[in-house]
Amino acid sequence: MTTASGDPIASVTDATLIDIATNGIWGPGLTPSESVADLARALLAALQGDQGAELPAELAQLVAEVRQASTVDVTGITVPGDTGDLRLSALTIKLNDGASHPVVIVPAGWNPYGWLPFLFAYLTLARRGYHVLAYSPRGIGIPGWLSTSEGFVDVAGEKDWADGSVVIDYAEEYFNPSKVGFLGLSYGSGISQLVAAHDPGERVSVVVAGSTWGNLATSLYANGTRHLEAVRLLIDFTGGPMEEKFDEDTQAILKDFLAGRNLDAVVAWGDKRSPQTYVDRTNARGIPTFISNTWHETLFPVGPVIDTFQRLTVPKRLNLWIGDHGAPEGPGLTGLLSGLPFPGLGVPMREAYQWLDHHLLDADNGVPEWTEAKAQSMFTYRTIPIPGGSNLITVAAKREALERWADFTTGGESWYLTGGNGSGDGVLSDKPAVGWSRDFAAGLLTEAVAVDKVMETGQKEWFGNPKVYDLAAFDRSRLLVWATDPLSGSGGVARRIRGEATVRLGLRSEAAAATLVAYLFDVLPDGTARIITHEPYTATDLTPNANTVVTWRLQAASYDLPAGHRLALVVNGRDPLYSYANMDLPVSTTTTIGSQTGQEAVLELPLG
């Protein structure tokens, strides 16, 4: 069997859905998994009336309800291109009861399948009482596929904003909706916010932005360090080679970023594509905005998202979750049924839909009484081992409601770095220590890494399987370690880490530039560890072999350090996610860390 587009239809069984619900939506190479693709194709075929599309009973019933209540169409929306009109691939679901309904517009994420993977979400929205228009932004998708749009990828630039307004025009003519809302994940979330802020008719009534970015420039280039792996993977994730997917100007920007040149122009390009840049427009238009993100986000780090959220004065909600990009929202968008494999799995999208229901359907569902933010504490879930060597969550991780985001961090404490005893690790102490220095070989890979694989490591965290580190196996010639003694506390918690930790270090380098990557770990009594947070910093224009002091903030975290555990700070000179100083040198250089009087080496730990 094949779909109307010629794509094969795989057999969809309960096992397909269980795979999505227990392993997430991402497969190898950061594309939607085979289960997600199989399910989406089968749903599309069933919607188009293919009698051979076999689905589990609950999904078959959902499709039957939508087919009976609506008209489903795969269509094209014409937008202007540089040399002629372009066709954006779109899917529409039009409710046929004659009543007035709002429309939810869903720009596709940055993936080779365009709008296809989220078929389940469109059906869910239709059943809740919405017309639905999903579309692939220009250039997204594998050439020749049903769900692929023509043109070059604009990376959420002005052409994407204008396209979004044309899509609204189309929706108004086709649906005559009562209101217009936008919902997006990842790329689609940024486009949703930017279209809402720029639509000339100010027609967007509400936005849901999942796994979104705040400032694209600082997401991909911060503290003098480029997020190289994320950009490399995003380029590979569009459905074709760079030369076919981007125009010459965008290619030049991407090549400059990868090469580390003309970075002022790269930053300006990223700023232009950032919801943060236009927050005043969003506020002036009063657009209710729902945002979700993850603590260990590897594409769009949480810091710029929080900064953007704090600047919003509209009705707003921020949900922060365990895991990485798209992991919390993914199952609810692609195929999550009523029999949830673990508690809390359906909450991320359920709350997103409730936000839409209140602002588009005037549902009296308690949304106005929600707190401004809700933060999930990392790894506070309870799990049991299951066959295959992984864990299953039996009790959902704790979430804390915050009336204001400013309430997240309420205090802090200082942990000073000491020199250690010769070749041994240093100590995190409550008393300043100066006059010491320790060095390591910089530019070499170490066992201390933020993730093993972008998105995949964090996806496993969301499903109850955080990465386990062995601090004893860390090569001390390539990194430095400082740790506390086992910490005590009340209620089984030694420290409630809430917010952005800050690191200040004395630095001396053989070279004129040096990269430092700081990692904060929870060390268990058996010596294994879990990562709390991290962040790189690259110092440039250094005088070789001269002392200086550097200070930077780590990514925000919500982490309950259990009583009896130790807190460890690890510093190395290279993480696979990032660029690093002296990449062009054939050998490593020596970086020395120390502590200077008046500017003692310290870890400032935020507490809540």
Image (tube, helix red, strand yellow):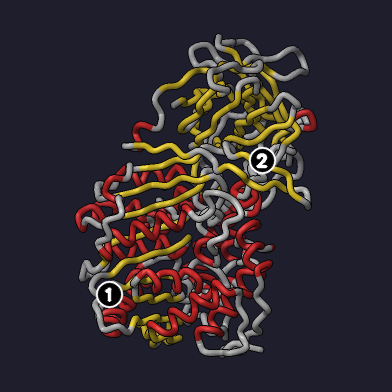
Viewer can see residue 404: yes
Which residue is disc 2 drawn over? 574
x and y percentages locating residue 335 in the rendered image = 55, 67
At a point 45% along the width and 21% down the height, the residue shown is: 412
Snapshot quadrant of residue 603: top right
Q: Is residue 382 left or right of residue 330?
A: right
42 lies above or below 502: below
Q: Amino acid at mark 1?
A: His
Q: Is residue 286 left or right of residue 434?
A: left
Which of the pair 387/603 is nearer the observer?
387
Disc 2 on helix, strand or loop?
Answer: loop
Which of the pair 58/299 is nearer the observer?
58
Which residue is disc 1 drawn over? 101
x and y percentages locating residue 417 in the rendered image = 60, 17
Q: Amino acid at mark 2?
A: Arg
The earlier-in-sequence mark between 1 and 2 is: 1
Viewer can see residue 555: no
- Disc 2: CA contacts within 10 A as few (<14), some (14-19) or many (>=20): many
592 lies above or below 429: below
